[in-house]
Image (tube, grey):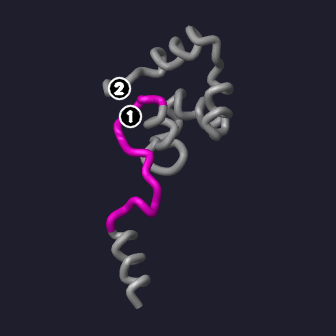
Amino acid sequence: MALRTVEEVKKELSDNGLTVSDWAREMGYSPALVYQVFSGRLKCTSGQSHRVAVALGLKKGKLGKIEDLSFVKEVRNQQNLK
């Protein structure tokens, strides 16, 4: 997937009759957080800002969960063996 610009994301939302706030609420994010991602005020390296940027196609990355991490799986497997 090619990365998008903020302008491309806003245009796609507009073309579909949606606002940034509509998208944010539908996806379970704060509209204020999404606007901060759009403005560049957040680095989007972790947490919800990272997930927002990845979901919008503004940056590469995964929308992973803690339990998807290999070392977490190893620890949980070891705990279940005891």
Q: Which mark is residue 3?
A: 2
Residue at left offset 37%, top offset 82%:
78
Compared with 59, 77 (above or below) is: below
Mark 1 near mark 2, Cβ–Cβ under 8 Å? yes
Q: Is residue 67 magenta?
A: yes
Compared with 12, 65 (above or below) is: below
Q: Which residue is mark 1?
A: 59
Q: Is residue 63 magenta?
A: yes
Q: Position of residue 34 (x, y in %)?
A: 59, 33
Residue at left offset 43%, top offset 83%:
80
Q: How many marks?
A: 2
Residue at left offset 39%, top offset 70%:
72
Compared with 1, 82 (above or below) is: below
Q: Does the magenta stretch mainly form a helix, a strand or a loop?
A: loop
Q: Which residues are magenta?
A: 56-70
Residue most toward the front? Answer: 81
Relative placement, left or right, of 49 versus 76 is right
Q: Position of residue 69 (x, y in %)?
A: 37, 62
Q: Quadrant of residue 39?
A: top right
Q: What amino acid does circle 2 point to? A: Leu
Residue 22 vs residue 45, the one in the foreground: 22
Marks 1/2: CA–CA distance: 6 Å
Residue 13 vs residue 50, the one in the foreground: 13
